[in-house]
Image (cartoon, grey):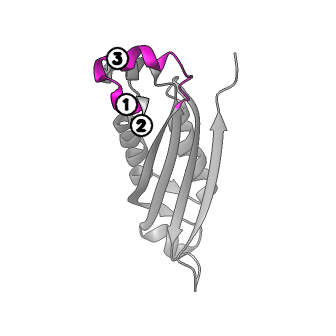
Amino acid sequence: MSNVSKTNVSNLAPLANSFRLEPALITITNLRLRTYIGFNEEELSKQQDVVINAEIRYQASKACEADSEDLALNYKVITKAMIAHVEQGHFRLLEKLCADLLTLAMEEPRVINASITVDKPHALRFADSVSVTLSGSRNAE
């Protein structure tokens, strides 16, 4: 029988000190929104679909140890800010929209790094979508 199967749940906290916990990865998948995006006349006159995927890393060790939502990164707050920005905005380029969303994610001081992908479905004939991905990391202090 392995040691894992013998481990009592109440004994897990001391075991956590035997390894280094890597930053948590929060993934927001296929956030479907509508916005004005593009620069030709038709694109400027009607909202189009965009699909957003985000990966956000933060150090979650304190949240894991305490099992407390107060210590966890509130991804709902970040997502709501993204939704409001996209739905209220007008963008010429996917790159601009993607950069804005990355900035919103990185505004949370506990975020170590983030990667945002914005897809524009049916932007090209014969293609499912066109996408832009941007990533950012917190400067080491």
Q: Is residue 78 above or below residue 37?
A: above
Of callouts 1 and 3, which one flags the residue occurring earlier in the amino acid sequence?
3
Q: In this figure, which residue is indicated by the disc labeled 3?
A: 11
Q: Amino acid at mark 2?
A: Ile
> Which quarter of the image is occupied by the N terminus?
top left
Where residue 56 appears, as percent x and y from the top left, is: 51, 39
Q: In this figure, which residue is indicated by the disc labeled 1?
A: 74
Q: In this figure, which residue is indicated by the disc labeled 2?
A: 78
Q: Is residue 44 above or below residue 4?
A: below
Q: CA distance from mark 1 to mark 3?
A: 28 Å
Q: Secondary structure at mark 2?
A: helix
Residue 101 can be seen in this image: yes
Q: CA distance from mark 2 to mark 3?
A: 34 Å
Q: CA distance from mark 2 to mark 1?
A: 7 Å
Residue 93 can be seen in this image: no
* Residue range corresponding to the magenta coloring: 4-23
Discs 2, 1 touching: Cβ within 8 Å: yes
Q: Amino acid at mark 1?
A: Asn
Where residue 6 appears, as percent x and y from the top left, is: 34, 28
Mark 3 Cα-neighbour bin, 10 Å: few <14, some 14–19, many ≥20: few
